[in-house]
Amino acid sequence: MAPPKKAGAGDSAPKKAIKKSSSQTKPGDKKRHKHKKFDSYSVYIFRVLKQVHPDTGISGKAMSIMNSFVNDVFERIASEASRLAHYSKRSTMSSREIQTAVRLILPGELSKHAVSEGTKAITKYMANKTPK
């Protein structure tokens, strides 16, 4: 059995050009792995906590519970607003449907505060919105 042939100068087989670029990794470099994007409200929950109680911290388990709570309330409001838009034969949810959904889902004084805070946020957004 003969050893395999080595490519010499007389071979007519085309060679692939190796292009060196700055993005190639060097032998000592470590590859960075892309982390899966995980959407969470934890940053915003933490900011609100620091506004209300600057000296108080929160555990990971408590943050997970708060994140689940926010997701649950968001889902309830969105589904109720969607139902209201469907009842009135509209294809677009507006702030009116969201406001009505909040009034239906949240009890008593809590809904009043939520509606006033939402109205305040919409007013602030519209004031800061740049005209095109």
Image (cartoon, rainbow, N blue to C red):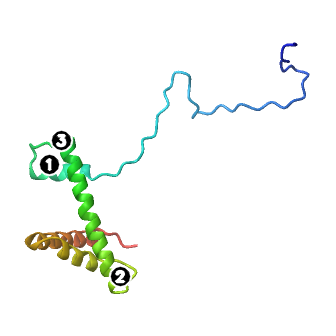
Nearer to the camera, 13 or 36: 36
Q: Quadrant of the N terminus?
A: top right
Give the vertical position of 11 relative to 125 (above or below).
above
Cα distance between the residues tagged 3 and 1? 14 Å
Please state which amino acid type lies under the numbered disc 3. Ser
Cα distance between the residues tagged 3 and 2? 40 Å
Rendered location of residue 123, percent (x, y): 23, 73
- The residue carrying mark 3 is 59
Q: Which mark is residue 86?
A: 2
Q: Report if the CB atoms under discs 3 and 2 are less than 8 Å apart.
A: no
Q: Which mark is residue 11?
A: none
Which of discs 3 and 2 lies nearer the camera? The answer is 2
- Among the 4 quarters of the image, the one containing residue 56: top left
Q: Residue at x 36, y 73 (%)?
A: 131
Which badge, 1 or 2, comes first in the chain's sequence? 1
Rendered location of residue 73, percent (x, y): 23, 63
Please rate how many residues cluster around mark 2, counting C-alpha atoms within 10 Å: few if below 14, some from 14 to 19, many from 20: few
- The residue carrying mark 1 is 50
> Disc 1 on helix, strand or loop?
helix
